[in-house]
Image (tube, coloured by chain):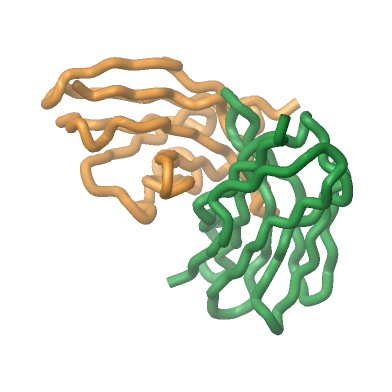
Chain colours: A orange, B green
């Protein structure tokens, strides 16, 4: 069974603080993705990765960095969190068929 | 750039009604088309895909047919149940970059009228 886990599941941060969202997958997929989900916008791609050591900008990368230290792990980093980054964040892994497996999501609130 | 438009933001029906959720796309080339479903409190799940004109994808009683002429991939189900209440996302796959990235529509929330 494909498995993508995210931590933390809920996070409250202060404006200007640093936030790191973590994602782990046991699917042995090369590709990993970070999305945010907001009412009225659906799922929007922030960053993605082709494999360990690679990160690519998605459609809305401003204010976010990503890190892929290994096949299994992909992190999303908010160096200076802002209230506009309050959202639900989803990590996904995928292979060449485009089918992506999503994690359960992280609810981030920036005060 | 590529885009996906889902006409309905919300749909509410009675049990056993026929469900249609409209999806139109704009893309160069020949994208693969997808439907994903998201149940409350969970991440989206792959439902099915279609890769060429007139191909029908189906799963769990849902189906959609790739129509290149009308650039559409409408989701249909003949008889809805309470368990179908969820948010449905149409998506297209970018065929050019090799990244296998998806572009999602804004989603359609389906609920049953009590």
Q: How many marks?
A: 0
Q: Identify which residue is drawn at 49% across, 48% down.
A: A50
Q: Position of residue B63 (x, y in %)?
A: 83, 55
Relative to A56, does residue B113 appear above or below in the rendering? above
Give the vertical position of A33 relative to B100 (above or below). above
- Residue A61, image x, y percentages: 29, 48
Q: Residue furthest bottom?
A: B69
Examine the rendered structure and indicate whether residue A96 appears above or below residue A101: below
Residue toward you, A18 or A49? A18
Residue at x 24% of width, y 31% of height: A78
Q: Quadrant of residue B52?
A: bottom right
Q: Which of B18 and A28 lies nearest the eye of the viewer?
A: B18
Asked if residue B101 can be seen in this view, the reply is no
Residue drawn at (57%, 59%), measured in percent from left and top? B6
Measured as percent of width and height from the top left, residue B86 is found at 66, 36
Q: Quadrant of residue A66?
A: top left
Q: Residue at x 63, y 70 (%)?
A: B31
Location of residue A84 in the rendering, given as x and y in whole percent from the top left corner? 23, 37
């Amino acid at each position: 069974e494909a498995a993508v886990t995210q931590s933390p599941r809920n996070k409250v941060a202060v404006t200007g603080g640093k936030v790191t969202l973590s994602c782990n997958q046991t699917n042995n997929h090369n590709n990993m993705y970070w999305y945010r989900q907001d009412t009225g916008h659906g799922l929007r791609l922030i960053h993605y990765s082709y494999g360990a050591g690679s990160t690519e900008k998605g459609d809305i990368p401003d204010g976010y960095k990503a890190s892929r230290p290994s096949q299994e792990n992909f992190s999303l980093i908010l160096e200076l969190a802002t209230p506009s980054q309050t959202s639900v964040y989803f990590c996904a892994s995928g292979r060449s068929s485009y089918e992506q497996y999503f994690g359960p999501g992280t609810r981030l609130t920036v005060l | 750039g590529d885009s996906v438009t889902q006409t309905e933001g919300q749909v509410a029906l009675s049990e056993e009604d026929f469900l249609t959720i409209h999806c139109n796309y704009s893309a160069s080339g020949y994208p693969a088309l997808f439907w994903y479903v998201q149940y409350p409190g969970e991440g989206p799940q792959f439902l099915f895909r279609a890769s060429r004109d007139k191909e029908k994808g189906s799963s769990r009683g849902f189906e959609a047919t790739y129509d290149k002429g009308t650039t559409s991939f409408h989701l249909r189900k003949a008889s809805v149940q309470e368990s179908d209440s969820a948010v449905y996302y149409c998506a297209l796959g970018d065929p050019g970059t090799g990244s296998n990235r998806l572009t999602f529509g804004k989603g359609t929330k389906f609920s049953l009228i009590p």
